[in-house]
Image (spheres, rainbow, N blue to C red):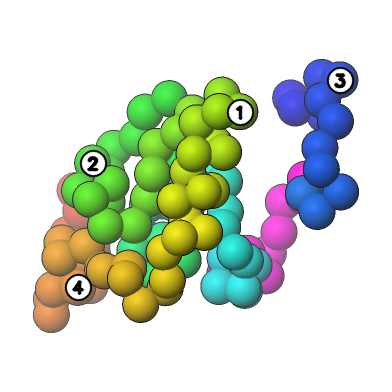
Amino acid sequence: MIEDKTIVFHSQISLLKLLRFNDYIKLQLYSKALLSDSGTFSKESSILEFKALNIGQAHEHPEAMKESVMMVGLKKERISQGLLVFGQESREKMLIVSDYCMSNILEKVLRLIIS
């Protein structure tokens, strides 16, 4: 775990314990940028239109990399590059991934869950 390492974070960076889903969504909506390795992070970023850096090594949603999330891994230089890009972009530039805004998306998700 990251807490076990001797890493010193900037005073404006907070490491948080698990949040309730509602609190997590609010955090996503009001943050300047989020870093996570969550499996649903790419979809959340696109649908809720927040800036996201995926610090994992891989993810299952490559379609989101075109519009909403950047894959940066854990290297400080790559995270800094991603944050720099976000600082130059406005929220208005963000687009919802077309796969996530279909009219029958709920039915598709239900079918996937049942499968």
Quadrant for residue 26, please give it. Answer: bottom right
Drawn side of residue 40 relative to residue 4, left or right: left
* Farthest-out residue, front: 88
Q: Regarding mark 4 in the picture, which secondary structure is present there?
A: loop
* Label annotation for residue 101: 4
Q: Are marks 4 and 2 in contact (CB under 8 Å)?
A: no
Q: Regarding mark 2 in the picture, which secondary structure is present there?
A: helix
**Badge 1: few (under 14), some or many (20 or more) residues near its Cα, within 10 Å?**
few
Give the residue displayed 26% in from the left and 68% down from the top: 96
Q: Are marks 4 and 3 in contact (CB under 8 Å)?
A: no
Viewer-nearest of discs 1 and 3: 1
**Which is more N-terminal, label 3 or label 1?**
3
**Badge 3: few (under 14), some or many (20 or more) residues near its Cα, within 10 Å?**
few
Gap between marks 2 and 1 measured at Cα: 22 Å
Label 1 amino acid? Lys
**Which is more N-terminal, label 3 or label 4?**
3
* Label annotation for residue 6: 3
**Badge 4: few (under 14), some or many (20 or more) residues near its Cα, within 10 Å?**
few
**Which is more N-terminal, label 4 or label 1?**
1
**Residue beneath label 1, please?**
76
Q: Give the range drawn in magenta.
A: 15-25
Gap between marks 1 and 3 measured at Cα: 15 Å
Point out residue 31 in the picture as x, y percentages from the top left corner: 62, 66
Q: Nearer the viewer, residue 46 or 11?
A: 11
Gap between marks 1 and 4 measured at Cα: 33 Å
**Badge 2: few (under 14), some or many (20 or more) residues near its Cα, within 10 Å?**
few
Is residue 20 magenta-colored?
yes
Is residue 61 magenta-colored?
no
